[in-house]
Image (tube, rainbow, N blue to C red):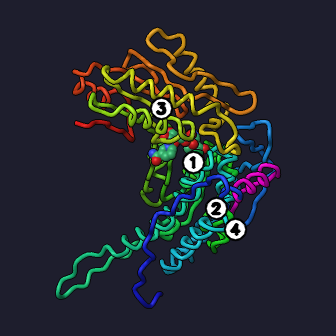
Amino acid sequence: MGKGFFNVPIAVNEPVKSYAPGTPERDAVLDAYKVMFNSKVDVPLYINGEDVPTGNTRTMSPPHDHQHVVGTYHLAEQKHIEDAIITALEARKSWSQMPWEQRAGIFLKAAELIAGPYRAKINAATMIAQSKTIHQAEIDAACELIDFLRFNVQFMADIYMEQPESTSDAWNRVEYRPLEGFTYAVTPFNFTAIAGNLPAAPAMMGNTIVWKPSDAQVFSARVIVEIFKEAGLPDGVINMITGDPVMVTDKVLSSPDFAGLHFTGSTFVFKSLWKQIGSNIETYKTYPRIVGETGGKDFIIAHPSAQAKQVATAIIRGAFEFQGQKCSAASRVYLPQSKAEEILGYVKADIETIGEPGSPEDMSRFVTAVIHEGAFDKLAAVIDRARSDSNAEIFAGGGYDKSKGYFIEPTVIVTTDPKYTTMETELFGPIVTVYIYQDEDWTNTLKLVDETSEYALTGAVFSED
Ligand code: NAD
């Protein structure tokens, strides 16, 4: 037990580096990119601090150069998942008893490693695995993951400080125990930071974890494993399993010791996991805690008083950064008739300056490839359909090509139907749909925004009024 009340370091957002020409960070990340791109890494499962190869492998390729192989990863079988669960339960015995400030120290050390010696590597891995530009990699894999780790230590201390009142004859105290079992972390492809945070946050609180990253992110997930190991995370606290998502999940969720799900990904998958947990409820020793963050159909609405240029910039950055593959990416836009032409004019002019999608190694690129062939084919079909539908037109972009990488041009669809399919459905790509409303219909249009999609997640209102 610690002998003292410990103040945790005050968390401050990690400053974002510029990567401007001539800066040391630019040279460092390009060097790391070259080394990683031109070598091959093998990523086994990671159980109890050991690499566990299974022999059943899949190759990994950058989405912007899909014929180029950067390594292989291994697929788990049932017995590996059992091993990971047993390991997590065993590790829980000592980890859950470790003084909280020592657990916190390990994650603060991990943040320092990312801020310093691992920064170029984790950014380069994210550029290769997820085709992020350096700016998108930096705000995600470096800065957001560092922030998650440092701020969560602070939040952890805040939670522990939350104590009940006492009376003159009774001293009330609360201890915050970890869950009685193991936690299953399931992470999406699009943020390296989320991949690190979903296992780390519950682990910080004394839980032990079976972590399943997305198949499309294994290359950068491996760097997270290396960092946690170097930071001193004891063996068995976070175990990484890769493999068929349905098989892995079925096995994990059938364990009586399953105690918590920490998920980020699509709405459909989260609902299916929730259902599965519900139907297995008789199996579990406790009531599992379920935490999930899911899809977005994010809107921008401009009032007739809005400034055209601001709205156009919001559309360009909101819809096309990281090829629109963010839960918070703008994907449906409502413009007033009186300003639409001016706003769309700026949008078109900006798109012309963006240039073709390409490799993130070329740091002048603003857009690169979408994550895999499945995403590419789905988005290309959406563009084809908009081309032939009478209530939609391709206003800008619309080109696609998967001969080298999964490249889709930033695309603007203008529709006359506010419930057109791309106004309603999350596409997760560089496609934004615009509906033009009559200025006097402002109030009804706000209702329309609310009623159009099953969910929103984020939204932006531009107005000077
Ligand atoms: P996804 O739902 O396809 O996959 C997420 C995870 O679930 C992956 O690890 C995947 O392997 C696993 N998975 C997929 N199908 C499964 C199944 N049938 N059973 C068990 N596990 C399964 O999502 P994605 O494509 O990796 O990520 C994009 C989605 O994530 C988008 O919908 C986006 O909006 C959402 N997202 C939300 C947030 C947020 O904070 N709200 C942040 C990032 C991403």
Circles 2 and 3: CB atoms closer than 8 Å: no
Expressed as whole percent of the image width and height from the top left, the position of residue 315 reads 44, 34
Cα separation, mark 3 vs mark 4, equals 38 Å
CA gap, disc 1 and disc 2: 13 Å
What residue is drawn where x is 45% and y is 49%?
292
Q: Which mark is residue 136?
A: 1
Range drawn in magenta? 28-49
Q: Which mark is residue 426?
A: 3
Q: Are marks 2 and 4 in contact (CB under 8 Å)?
A: no
Q: What residue is at 55 percent from the left and 74 percent from the top?
A: 95
| Badge 2: residue crowd in 10 Å (few <14, some 14–19, many ≥20) | many
- Mark closer to the chain start, 3 or 4: 4
Which marked residue is nearer to the observer: mark 3 or mark 4?
Answer: 3
**Which of disc 2 and disc 1 is earlier in sequence?**
2
Image location of residue 120, percent across then percent down:
67, 59
User: Which residue is the site of mark 2?
Assistant: 119
Instruction: Report helix, strand or loop for mark 4.
Output: loop
Mark 2 residue type: Arg
Q: Quadrant of the C terminus?
A: top left
Spatial separation of the CA atoms under disc 1 and disc 4 = 30 Å
Q: Residue at the spot x=82%, y=51% of the render?
A: 40
The residue carrying pointer 3 sits among few (fewer than 14), some (14 to 19) or many (20 or more) residues within 10 Å by Cα, namely many
